[in-house]
Each structure stands twice: as C-alpha cells, then as structure tokens.
C-alpha cells in the first residue's frame, strides 16, 4: 500500500493511520491536500540536491487529494454491502451489484463476512478498504504482512490488534466491550496479553506465577489449540451489531503458516456474525499451489458460504485523467494529453501514476505558469528524460541519485522488512556504515538520512521507534540496490551486526530478525567452524522462540538450519547442542504433522548407543507419544518397558505369567501405602527428581498404551504411578494417576473406593493445575467414576465442561474424550434420538476436524446404532450406514490393535441383535466378547453390556435344554449377582437393570410370581430414574413373559407401552419391528385401538384446558 497519500478519520488510531498510510513521523498534511515536511535545520542544510524537496511556492504546490478514490465505485459499494450485513444482520437484502456475489446459504450464516481483494502491486487494494471503512462506526483494525518476515509468526494479526485497546477506550462502548472480552477470555488473559501487550490496559498485568505457567505451556500443539480457541472467543466478544469489527489483513500472500491457520479458525467461527475480514493479496505472486489459496478454499468449504471476491485492475485512461485533472485543478480535456503519457509509462497503476506525476513535478517538468494561471508540462522533455517504459526502473534511478550514506541505510532497512524497528537499524548500521572513502563527504548521520527519507516520502514513521517504507515498491527498489551477486552475504552481515552489537537483554527481542538474515545462503563451509557452532546455537534459540509462539514450521526450519551448520558430526565435543537441535526439530515436525521428519530426527538421537539414557529421555518420551497416537501399541509397549529397564526401575511381570494373585498382591501393597497417607494425599510434597518425573511420563504413556490395547498390565501400571506419587512426591501425572486408580477399584467392584479417589484427583487438580492433563483427568472423573454413585444424566454437563476445558488448554484429545462421554451420557440417559442424532453428528464432525480419529472411531458405532434404531439404515441388524462402514472400521481397528473400538462394535452389534430378536446371532457375538470390565474399565458401557449379556443368556435358556440350558442360566445368574452388587453399592443407574434381569431369571426358573413383581419393579425404577428406553425394553420383555403364560390382557398392555415408549424415544425402526414381529403382531389391533383412544383423550384434555 502507498502510505503517503491516504488520509484516515473515524475509528482509526493515530498509530494505525501512520502505519497504514496516514501522514506522520515528520510528514504533515498541509490542510489543503499539500504535503509539507518538518525536518531539523541541520538536516535541511545537509540534504543538498540529492534529496527531492517539496518547494514552498504558495499556489504552485502540487495538490493530490489523499482521500481521492478513482475508478472504484462498484468495488466500494460491494464492500459497503458486506459491512451492512454485519452491522444489521437482519437486513440481508442484496443490491443488484452484489446479487451474483453471495449465495443463498450465506445470507443466514452466523460466520463472519469475508471479502478478498486481489490484484498486482500498486492497484490500490489497501486504499480502497481504508477509504471505505475509515469513517464507519466500527472497530477497524489493520495488519500487514511482509516478505522479509515470513518466519515471524502472526505478525499481521498481532499488529492489527495492537491498536484495539486504544480504539475501545475511545469508543462509546468501552464498558460493554471490556466486560465482554474479560468474560470471554477469563483466566486466560495472560495468553492474549503475551501476544498483544497493549491489552494489559484492559486485562491488567500478569503476575509472576501466571507468566511462569504460561511459559511452561508454550511450545506444544496443546498451546496452539488453546490459542486458536481463545482467540476465537476474544474476537467474537469485541464485535456487536451496533459496533462491528472490520479486520484488514494486507499482503496475505506473505503471511506465515500460523497466521493462515489462525485465520481459518477465526473466519469459520459460527459464533461471530458481526465481524468482517478483508483480505488482500497480489495475485501475480500466488500460484495454484500457494498455501493462501488452499486456506481460502478451506475457509469457503467450512463456512459453506461464498465470500466476496474483488479483482482490482489498473485504472482506465479516463480514471487516470480524472485523477490528474483533480490534482491539477484543471479541465479533463486540458489534462488528457498528460494523462495519456502517464498511462503509457504506468499502465494506469494508481500508485505509479501518482508517483510519476510527483516525479514530473520534482524534475520541474510539470510547473505552474503564473502568467497563464494553469499547470504546464513539456511532453518532449517527458519522453526524453523518462526514456524507459518500465516505471519501476525510474524508482531505482531515483534512489541511485541519493548520497551513498542514504543508499546504504535504505539497503539495510530493506533487509529488515517493510516495517522495521529503529533500534534494529541502528544496531545494524554500527557495523554496516560505509568507510570514509566511500561516503559522500556530507557527514550525514543515521538520523539525518531518516529525516530526509521521510521528507522525500521514501519512509514514514509509524511510532516513536518504528519506521516503514512508504510503499512495498520502494522497499523492493531499495533491496535491488544491493548487488545480486553479494546479496546473501550482505544479508548475513546485517544479521551478524545485529547480534554482535545488541545488548544481552536485546538479543531475545531481535533474535528472529537477526537469525533470518544470518541464515541467508548459510551452508557448512561458507563460514568457519566456530562461527557455524555459534550460528547453530542462535538457531536453536530462534527455534525455541518460535515453538513458544506455536509456530512449528518456522521452528523446524531454524532447527534444520542449525543441524546443517553443525555438519556431518553434530555431536562433536559437547553433544548437547546437537541433541537439543534434533529433539526440538522432532517436536516441531510432530506438531506440524510431519511425522516422517520427526522420526528421522529422533532416530539420530535414539540410535546413539554412546549416549546416556538421561540424555535420550526427552526424545524417548516424544517417540512414545508418537507411537501411541499412531496406534502402534505393540511397539510402544515394548519401548516403554525397555526405557524403564534402562533407567534402572524394576520391570513388570511378563504378561503371560500374570495371575489374579499377582494383582491382589500388587493392590495390597498399594492400599497399605494409601492408608499411611489417607486424608493428606493432596498435601504431599512435589516430586523433585527429574529422571523420575520423566519416568512418570513413560508410565503415563505405558498406561495409555495398555488402555487402548487392553493389556493385562494396565492395573499394574496404574498402581505403580500411585505408589511413586505417594513415596517420591506429586507431579502433573499424579492427578490422572489417582483418577485412573479409581477406575481400577470400580472394575474390581469397589465402587465407593473408586469414587473416593475421584475426590482425591479433584483436589490434586485444584492444587497442581496441570494444563497438559487437566481435561484427561476430568473426563476420567466425570465420565468413568461419578456415574457409579450419581445419576448418569448428571454427567452430561460436566463432560461438556471437560470439552471446553480441553479446548481452552489446547488438549484436543482430552476435549474430544469429553465430547465422547457427553454423547454416551445422552445415549444412556434416554435423550430423544432425533436430538441425539444431531448432537452426535456435531460431535463426530468436531472430532474429525481436530484429527482425533481414534475417538471418532469410538463414538461412531453409537452414532450408527442410533440411526439403526431410528429406522434410517437398510438393515437394522447391520452396523453400517450413513455414520460408518462396518467392514472398513473393523479392518482399521483390528489392524491397529485398537481393541476398545473392535470390542465396542461387537458389543453394540450384540445389543442390536437382541433388540431386533436375532437371539442366535447375539449369543454367538457374546461368545467373542471379552470381559467389559477389562475392556471398558469404569465406563457405564460395562453395565450396558452386562445387561444385554444377561438378557441374551436367559433368552437362550428359554429355548435350550439340558446342559446347554444350565450353562446359559448359570452365566445369566452371575450377571444378576454382579448388577445386584452395583445396585447395592449405590448405583441407581443399575437398579432397573438388576430388577429386569431378576425378572428374566425368575421366568427362566418358572417362578412366575417373582417374575411379575420384578418386571413391575424394573418398569417403575426405569421410569423414576429416567431410563425411558429401558422402560420400553422392560415392557417388551414383560409382554413376552405374559404371552408365554397366556395372560393376553397384560401382554397387550405391555405391548402398547413398549410400542409407545420406543416411539416416544424416537426409535421408530424398533417400533415398526415390534409391530410386525411375533407375538407382538398378535396384539396389533388392540395396540391401535389403545393408541387411538389415548390420542382422543389427549385431544379432549387439551381442548378442556
């Protein structure tokens, strides 16, 4: 953008005006549209004839209206229309101009509006936006990207928001906005202020504890996820219908990958309809494979709506002539010949047309004739003096007329970017100044050159310490002054100068700028070994900085550069630098999804047998996390055990040697230690042994591996984590360790003991506040423990809270497990199936969006079961349809040893087979199912599977004889005992199951009186506890029982209640099946009469009321 001839009013702050195009930093608007320059008298004397000056000639000044927008009326109307849609969303009418722009789905969308403006440099993209929104009643933010700063994360977005606080305070909605963003961000304001320091005026300063906690969280994928979640809430809180938010992100083709990812998150937020994103880019610098176009495509796909697309071309001759005539205050017919010359040189580019007009004025070719009272020009001189038709060459020629000192300053500044810090330029110039023999002899200081460059509209001053080139084209021309053959060496010299001259406390601030320049063309052999090591260490620090900003691709690039600088033997001498570079590179590649490169760097470290295990521990933990997330459970299990053995910790028993006696002995040892610390576990000291803390991380990875693969080692790992926490102190893994121990106790029948450790884990969360394990610990507490003594429906809201906490902490896996358990709670507690189906759709979409395929695979079978029961699948007995494909899901789960999913699928298929009366298939599947207490420890699905196991056993006993019948009765009776223990221990969620199984058992033993009582108890208890689907099931089973003993009246009543219960629940597929299957079809007429009578009673009651 041309920062010299834009003028802004309205909501733009002073700093934004200067950065985005306002006159500032020594350049002042003369009031009549002219430009005057304020420079020191010494600078005025020294500038000589090398710098162009604005002559103070009264009426003969060239006056170019900075607010003049030529040839963009249609585009401006389109932007105004987009703005009206966020300012008054209820007014969605579209003018004739825009009728082709918006799709129908976009009219009622809750996502932000988006406009994309593209064209070559100098077509006035930025000016168009500023001119459109500069005076609107909105928060208007401007951020610009720079090709020289591609590795700098989020520069455009953070610079845009840097002025927000000033605008909020100046607005009449200060109280509303401040309250809204404080409520939205809450305790996580520290993250926002770490990116946008100016927001401390609203949030207040962070205390030391908050800063330490934030530093500890940085550098992980969780931190990046948390950043996206919070920034979405932050942005949505700013805007309102009465005071919208407009964000202009300029030159987005230069944006870093992290900015594009954050933009994707913000532009697809379905809770932010009062924001307009305006994005600009140069289409001649963007090819088909450019990351920006991919991001724009992803945004459009997720928004499910078109965005406004504006292509800007150069101005027509008529438009240029209007610009010239307005500037010269002359008739268009008089200026047409001059305009034709300008167009022939500039092709109608708005920027170059204005620049060329000024050049004519500065060269005294365009002059004001006082005798004729009009402007005159010499066309012969124009053609002879400006021979080239490439107007950009004229800019280069102009810069080459500057004194050598001026050229050198602009060369160095061009290496720093379009916008640069004055202190960085000063540091660089300490070593990059010209030797005396090459200087002009004018004795120009850096300050003099900056003042003169501002006066000549080459630079502008953004704020007290920041400068910017007046336009990208000027920066490009200044960069071209550096000889191409030595350009990379020049950039390295600038970077090295910054590092060498900066004070120690300044290096972290300017490090990324310096190291980007130092890395230009750097390869081993171009610099000496000592210099290579020094640069490699700087790249490591740069990588750490990038990781803290969640900029994983730049972090990987810095580490790769550091590794390259160390050459073929990166571990020569002190191996620490090489290890740190490879390890950080592996983390960066992992977070950016490049697993192949991650493994390559880890293998370099882990393959070194001469390294002590302590040096390799962080790399082992990274490797283990990758194996677990990749479902390589066998490899992860073997590696965990190997690492623990190398650390000198006692190993676990061989899996094939494990017995119940081993588990009993291990549990006794753990319980003995727990009694010693009972009541004061949450007050135990913290673990201070770094090696053991890493080992706890290994145990945590081992537990997750065992949980997913259903290894018998699972309880042994859980108890060891608890014992270590008790004996050696607490760490962040202790919270989830005690919660998991609770699930182990529950799976062994000790429900009250399991819930007791849910309380212990909750207290540890309050004390330790572990961001990395907060969500995971809470989903164990809420999803796997509390339901044993509380109604299952009470777990729904807490599980959604786990989802929110996981998003806030950046723990996507923990968040999605929260969603998983929320969906399961809704299913178990009889939410209407049509509503549940919509929720599961949303939950599954969220899981896939966040790439949590394993959790998605765990929820999908429930989703498909809902569809089957609703009658939305071809065959209700086959777990395939819109939600999942059974065969492919089984192949994936079995191939990855994801036993949780494969067993869950089998369990749900068994349930469907029973519900749709395919009892033979249900019994066969039952034989292949493992003990659910081992497969789903703590989960309520244990109870569900046991219910249908018992029902299947007693149903098979009805048709079996002899030994086969006794086998089924015995197995079913064991389930009755199990559910009885659960109900007696306080599980109200299992009471109705126990009564129903007792009824089936009594019927199987021909104890009909007991069966009648138990059926009644099952129905009443299911009703009172809110399990409507199980109430319908109990009525269905009671109908079969009474039909069997030839009590047709009761059988008919129970058939009606079963049909009505399934229908009310939304299980229309099951209801239809019930009405057509024997013996229920026998009672169809009675059911229809009862249904009609019931409907009539309801109508009369409704009319009476």
Image (cartoon, rainbow, N blue to C red):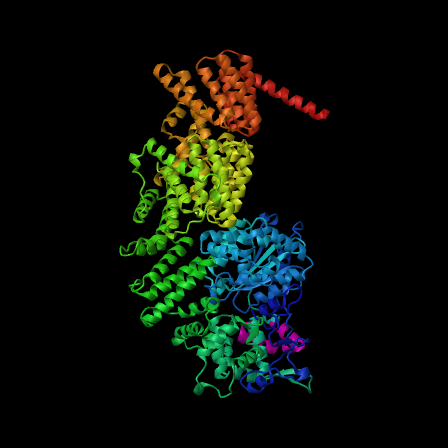
| Left/right of residue 124 with respect to residue 33 in the rendered view | left
Q: Is residue 87 above or below residue 475?
A: above
- Residue 275 drawn in magenta: no
911 relative position to 239: left or right:
left
Location of residue 631 in the rendering, given as x and y in whole percent from the top left corner: 37, 43
State how many labels appear. 0
Seen in the image, is 455 located left or right of residue 874?
right
Q: Is residue 500 visible?
A: yes
Image height of 818 relative to 572, above or below? above
Toward the viewer: 311 or 643?
Answer: 643
Name the residue located 57 percent from the left edge and 26 percent from the top edge.
1024
- In the rendered image, which quarter contains the C terminus? top right
Q: Magenta part of the protein: which range?
A: 320-348
* Residue 386, image x, y percentages: 52, 81
Q: As drawn, which residue projects farthest toward the front?
A: 676
Q: Is residue 548 above or below residue 46?
A: above
Relative image position of residue 535 (x, y in whole percent):
38, 68
Please say whether residue 334 is one of the residues in the magenta stretch.
yes
């Amino acid at each position: 953008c041309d920062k010299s001839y834009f003028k802004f009013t309205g909501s733009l702050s002073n700093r934004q005006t200067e950065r985005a195009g306002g006159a500032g930093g020594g350049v002042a608007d003369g009031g009549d549209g002219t430009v005057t320059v304020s420079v020191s008298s010494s600078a005025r004397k020294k500038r000589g004839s090398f710098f162009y000056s604005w002559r103070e000639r009264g009426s003969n000044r060239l006056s170019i209206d900075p607010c003049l927008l030529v040839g963009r009326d249609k585009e401006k109307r389109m932007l105004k229309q987009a703005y009206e849609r966020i300012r008054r969303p209820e007014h969605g009418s579209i003018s004739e101009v825009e009728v082709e722009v918006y799709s129908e789905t976009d009219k009622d969308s809750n996502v932000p509006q988006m406009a994309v403006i593209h064209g070559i440099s100098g077509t006035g993209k930025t000016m168009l936006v500023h001119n459109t929104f500069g005076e609107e009643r909105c928060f208007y933010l401007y951020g610009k990207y720079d090709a020289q700063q591609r590795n700098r994360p989020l520069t455009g977005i953070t610079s845009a928001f840097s002025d927000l606080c000033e605008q909020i305070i100046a607005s009449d909605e200060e109280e509303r906005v401040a309250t809204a963003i404080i409520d939205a961000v809450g305790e996580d304001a520290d993250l926002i202020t770490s990116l946008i320091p100016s927001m401390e005026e609203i949030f207040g300063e962070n205390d030391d504890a908050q800063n330490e906690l934030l530093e500890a969280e940085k550098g992980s994928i969780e931190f990046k996820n948390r950043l996206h979640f919070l920034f979405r809430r932050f942005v949505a809180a700013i805007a309102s219908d009465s005071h919208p938010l407009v964000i202009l992100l300029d030159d987005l083709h230069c944006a870093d990958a992290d900015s594009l990812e954050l933009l994707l998150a913000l532009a697809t937020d379905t809770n932010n309809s009062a924001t307009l994103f305006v994005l600009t880019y140069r289409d001649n610098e963007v090819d088909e494979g450019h990351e920006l176009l991919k991001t724009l495509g992803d945004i459009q796909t997720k928004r499910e709506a078109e965005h406004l697309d504006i292509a800007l071309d150069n101005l027509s001759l008529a438009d240029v002539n209007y610009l010239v005539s307005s500037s010269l205050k002359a008739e268009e017919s008089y200026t047409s010949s001059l305009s034709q010359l300008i167009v022939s040189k500039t092709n109608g580019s708005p920027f170059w047309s204005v620049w060329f007009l000024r050049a004519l004025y500065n060269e005294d070719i365009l002059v004001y004739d006082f005798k004729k009272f009009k402007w005159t020009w010499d066309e012969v001189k124009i053609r002879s003096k400006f021979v080239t038709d490439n107007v950009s060459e004229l800019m280069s020629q102009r810069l080459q007329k500057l004194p050598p000192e001026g050229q050198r300053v602009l060369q160095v500044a061009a290496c720093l970017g379009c916008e640069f810090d004055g202190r960085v330029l000063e540091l660089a110039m300490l070593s990059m100044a010209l030797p005396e023999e090459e200087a002009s002899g004018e004795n120009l200081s850096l300050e003099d050159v900056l003042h003169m460059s501002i006066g000549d509209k080459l630079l502008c001053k953004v704020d007290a310490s920041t400068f910017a080139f007046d336009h990208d084209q000027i920066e490009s021309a200044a960069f071209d002054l550096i000889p191409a053959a030595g350009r990379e060496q020049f950039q390295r010299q600038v970077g090295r100068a910054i590092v060498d001259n900066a004070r120690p406390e300044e290096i972290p601030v300017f490090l990324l700028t310096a190291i980007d320049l130092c890395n230009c063309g750097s390869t081993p052999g171009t610099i000496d070994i000592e210099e290579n090591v020094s640069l490699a260490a700087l790249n490591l620090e740069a990588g750490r900085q990038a990781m803290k900003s969640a900029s994983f691709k730049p972090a990987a690039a810095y580490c790769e550069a550091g590794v390259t600088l160390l050459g073929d033997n990166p571990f020569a001498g002190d191996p620490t630098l090489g290890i740190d570079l490879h390890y950080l590179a592996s983390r960066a590649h992992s977070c950016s999804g490049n697993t192949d490169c991650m493994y390559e760097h880890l293998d370099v470290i882990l393959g070194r047998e001469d390294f002590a295990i302590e040096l390799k521990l962080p790399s082992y933990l990274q490797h283990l996390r990758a194996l677990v997330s990749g479902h390589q459970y066998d490899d992860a299990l073997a590696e965990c055990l190997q690492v623990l053995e190398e650390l000198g910790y006692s190993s676990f028993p061989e899996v094939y040697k494990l017995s119940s006696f081993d588990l009993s002995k291990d549990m006794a040892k753990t319980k003995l230690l727990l009694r010693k610390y009972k009541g004061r576990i949450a007050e135990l000291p913290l673990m201070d042994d770094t090696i053991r803390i890493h080992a706890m991380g290994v145990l945590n990875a081992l537990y997750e591996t065992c949980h997913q693969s259903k290894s018998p080692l699972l309880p042994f790992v859980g108890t060891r984590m608890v014992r270590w926490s008790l004996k050696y102190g607490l760490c962040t893994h202790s919270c989830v360790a005690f919660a998991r121990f609770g699930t182990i106790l529950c799976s062994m029948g000790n429900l009250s003991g399991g819930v007791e450790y849910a309380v212990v884990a909750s207290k540890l969360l309050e004390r330790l506040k572990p961001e990395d394990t907060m969500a995971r610990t809470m989903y164990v507490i809420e999803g796997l423990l509390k339901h044993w003594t509380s109604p299952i429906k009470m777990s729904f809201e807490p599980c959604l809270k786990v989802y929110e906490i996981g998003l806030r902490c950046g723990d996507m896996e923990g968040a999605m497990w929260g969603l998983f358990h929320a969906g399961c709670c809704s299913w178990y507690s009889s939410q209407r199936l049509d509503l549940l189906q919509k929720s599961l759709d949303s939950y599954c979409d969220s899981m896939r969006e966040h790439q949590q395929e394993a959790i998605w695979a765990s929820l999908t079978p429930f989703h498909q079961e809902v569809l089957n029961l609703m009658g939305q699948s071809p065959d209700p007995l086959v777990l395939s349809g819109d939600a999942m494909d059974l065969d492919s899901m089984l192949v994936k789960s079995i191939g990855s040893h994801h036993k949780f999913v494969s067993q869950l699928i089998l369990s749900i298929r068994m349930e469907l087979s029973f519900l749709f009366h395919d009892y033979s298939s249900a019994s066969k599947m039952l034989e292949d199912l493992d003990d659910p207490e081992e497969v789903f420890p703590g989960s309520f699905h244990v109870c569900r599977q046991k219910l249908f196991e018992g029902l299947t056993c007693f149903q098979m006993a009805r048709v079996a004889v002899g030994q086969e019948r006794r086998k089924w009765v015995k197995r079913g009776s064991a389930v009755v005992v199990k559910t009885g223990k659960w109900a007696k221990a306080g599980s109200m969620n299992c009471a109705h199951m126990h009564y129903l199984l007792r009824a089936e058992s009594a019927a199987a033993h021909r104890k009909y009186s007991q069966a009648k009582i138990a059926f009644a108890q099952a129905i009443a208890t299911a009703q009172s506890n809110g399990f409507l689907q199980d109430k319908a099931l109990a009525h269905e089973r009671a109908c079969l029982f009474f039909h069997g003993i030839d009590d047709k009246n009761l059988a008919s009543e129970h058939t009606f209640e079963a049909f009505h219960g399934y229908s009310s629940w939304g299980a229309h597929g099951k209801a239809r099946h019930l009405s057509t299957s024997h013996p229920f079809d026998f009672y169809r007429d009675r059911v229809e009469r009862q249904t009609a009578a019931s409907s009539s009673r309801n109508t009369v009651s409704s009319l009476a009321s």
